[in-house]
Amino acid sequence: MTTATARSIFMGPRLRRLRRELGLTQADMAADLEISAPYVALLERNQRPVTADMLLRLARTYKIDLADLAGDGGADHTARMQSILKDPMFSDIDIPALEISDLAVSYPGMTEAFLRLYTAYREEQLALAEQRAPAISGSTPRPGQETIDANDPVADVRRFLAARRNNFANLDDAAERLAQAMFQGSSAGSPQVSAGPAGFIERFRVRHNLQVRYMPPNVMLGSLRRLDLHRRQLLIEDSLDSASLKFELARQLAYLELDTEIGAALEDGKFASKTAELLARRALAAYAAAAIIMPYSIFAKAVDTRQYDLEALARQFGTSFEQTAHRVTTLQKPGAEKIPFFLIRVDPAGNISKLLDGAGFPFARHGGACPLWSVHDVFKTPRQIVTQWLELPDGQRFFSIARTVTAGGGSYGAVRVERAIAVGCAAEHAGQLIYTRDGHGPDANEPTPIGVACRVCHRPKCAARSAPPIGREILPDDFRTSAVPFGFSAD
């Protein structure tokens, strides 16, 4: 017997699942493989190993790829379990790594059930936080207001993303395979090969019989991208900048080729409305587009090399500053996690249009953010990065990187929208960022004392305060005017 033939593995649960997917009884499978039914039962109970010879027999009989059949030995489930078990809720339970691996390999069904239950738990915790928000902010909810807040489609999608730490590993894997198929043989897989649209255009032509055409705004009638299946055309507005053009091509490709993976990611989301589900689908398509342009494994290596220099990364991958900043918030693939980041996008009026939290930043559920945060001030210095150390009333410290970004434009008279984004991380991770080098570390910069929102911030001497905090009685100003907006009885 050769060494290859002697090699064996235990894969009972996977074999049982394969048999059930094929609609076979143990006797049917035994007949197909020319073995006894009791032997199939032993294999499924992990009382006998599956030899290399048996793997080959399974692959030939059922026309299955050998790599798919052998699987990854539960590596993905193991990594996900290890990531989840870091939750403080499990901190008092001693679970050896070997036990986690044994569970993932031997009982993948139970492991998947646990992962789904934990994700559902996270969603419910976030939903509960949303429902409690009016009470926390000090306002009295109107009758039915709790239901309205809980069913807000935007908040619903934010909960969906936050419960998964804004990471969808299966979507990342599928997008990376697609990117490799598109750009294989070009510069040995260097990320620079995705800088132009040529690979996408060729993919649309060969795989989907679609011609990409660039059309002026007066023809597009308000659309940036339009798929015309009748004429087998993908129409793109010709005034888009290169980063936006490539992103729209990638987004359409995601809808065409990653629809199954997007649907699978949506399946376990409990959305309160159809609108929320559609918004989540849009978010996942955009996630997939970014994952095609910035494949996880290549991008994860690049952030280490560049020390999270967002502008340098944007140039390397041919993306915009915002696309790049958004992508760094998604790097929480189990077993390959990078620094957890949060991201917020605001307009000059303080309206929040994007909110992603993977770093545990206590964003206000209702109302605006603290005006002392530089994200509200960078409109005075367009396109310049402004860094800031932040300290919350409870002593938590974060490091923030803020800059303005522009949407729209591209031609004379076209509407432009100026927004500001801030991306940041907890202070303990900030030393890995290029922005904290050259005298910008925590010791060289006094942190700015900020609050989550004025109604829950108890810093009495804040001149930027817009409302008194909950539970504090203000002093009358009949005889004295304070230098700060409100004086308090305990001052």
Image: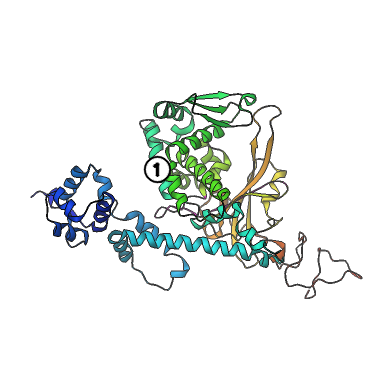
The answer to whether residue 270 shows anywhere in this view is yes
In the image, residue 385 lies at what x, y percent? 63, 45
Q: Nearer the viewer, residue 420 or 407?
A: 407
> Residue, x 28% and y 50% (percent of image)?
21
> Residue, x 39% and y 31% (percent of image)?
187
* Residue position marked by numbered label 1 in the rendering: 174
Q: Residues within 10 Å of mark 1 (few under 14, many from 20)?
A: some
In the image, residue 316 lies at what x, y percent? 49, 37
Three-letter residue code for mark 1: Ala
| Horizontal arrangement in the rendering, residue 168 relative to residue 105 (left or right) | right
Bounds of the magenta segment: 329-348
Residue 287 part of the magenta segment: no
**Dominant secondary structure, magenta:** loop
> Residue, x 44% and y 41% (percent of image)?
259
Determine whether the residue tagged by mark 1 lies in a helix, strand or loop: helix
Q: Nearer the viewer, residue 421 or 165?
A: 165
Residue 346 part of the magenta segment: yes
| Horizontal arrangement in the rendering, residue 234 relative to residue 60 (left or right) | right
